[in-house]
Amino acid sequence: MPPLILHPFAESNDPAKLIESSRAGMALEGLLPEEGKSRVQLDRALIDGRFCEIRMLFYVGRDLVRWIDQCLDVAKRNPENYPPDVSRQTFVEYLTRHAPPSVDAKLSQWGVQGYGRIFARAIALHSIFAEAPSPSSLTENFIRHYHRYTDQIFAYDQKKPFTPLDAANYTFELYASGEYSRMLERQWES
């Protein structure tokens, strides 16, 4: 299978927004002190962070869908190595539920927990939007609860019949784009 290459997608202040959003959400739920911030300020921080999540997931989804399309192409050109009738759902299910242990380990190194749910939401967001959305193109309600919408869209899409892969027989590697570029440069120099 082709390697999965994830490209950088974060703005310089995105990690801080995500942390602030998480704290704001916990403060709004009464799990952390409000630290002198009004409910309006906390709510704004929550919304800003959620929008940041949406954009990040959209870009991850773009990379995942590109990989899925590459897998479909490989399967069509090598029918002897894949079950008949493989489809987009075949590779989506494999990616979100049965990724190789090396991929799980690398994502854990990067601090990603629950990659299956994250990948599912990213794929769903990419199916909703052709381009990364702007804040003004989304309602506050969608931003606040995007995860519920994406979870439902993903579940609906996966209800279509598909041929599953035996995960033990297929593997791929995961790379950050910079990491992959450096690897290729080293190979070309050899």
Image (cartoon, helix red, strand yellow):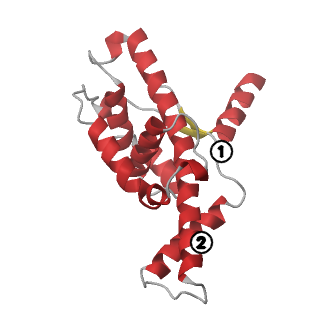
Q: Nearer the viewer, residue 170 or 153?
A: 153
Q: Residue at x 39, y 16 (%)?
A: 75
Q: Nearer the viewer, residue 132 or 40?
A: 40
> Can residue 117 be seen?
yes
Instruction: Give the amino acid type for the residue marked by disc 2 in the picture.
Output: Glu
> Can residue 190 be seen?
no
Label 1 element class: loop
| Disc ID at residue 168 | none
Closer to us: mark 1 or mark 2? Answer: 2
- Label tally: 2
Q: Residues within 10 Å of mark 2 (few under 14, many from 20)?
A: some
Report x, y in % for residue 101. Answer: 40, 45
Report x, y in % for residue 91. Answer: 36, 30
| Disc ID at residue 20 | 2
Residue 35 sits above or below residue 7 on the image: below
Residue 40, quarter of the rendered image: bottom right
CA gap, disc 1 to disc 2? 21 Å
Q: Residues within 10 Å of mark 1 (few under 14, many from 20)?
A: few
Residue 82 sits above or below residue 135 on the image: above
**Which of marks 2 and 1 precedes in the sequence?**
1
Residue 103 sits above or below residue 48 on the image: above
Q: Residue at x 43, y 84 (%)?
A: 31
Q: Residue at x 34, y 43 (%)?
A: 153
Report the residue marked by disc 1. 8
Report x, y in % for residue 183. Answer: 68, 33
Quadrant placement of the N terminus: top left
Asked if the residue at tag 2 contacts the one at tag 1, i.e. Cβ–Cβ closer than 8 Å, the answer is no
Q: Residue at x 65, y 59 (%)?
A: 14
Residue 156, quarter of the rendered image: top left
Instruction: Give the amino acid type for the residue marked by disc 1 in the picture.
Output: Pro
Q: Is residue 3 left or right of residue 176?
A: left
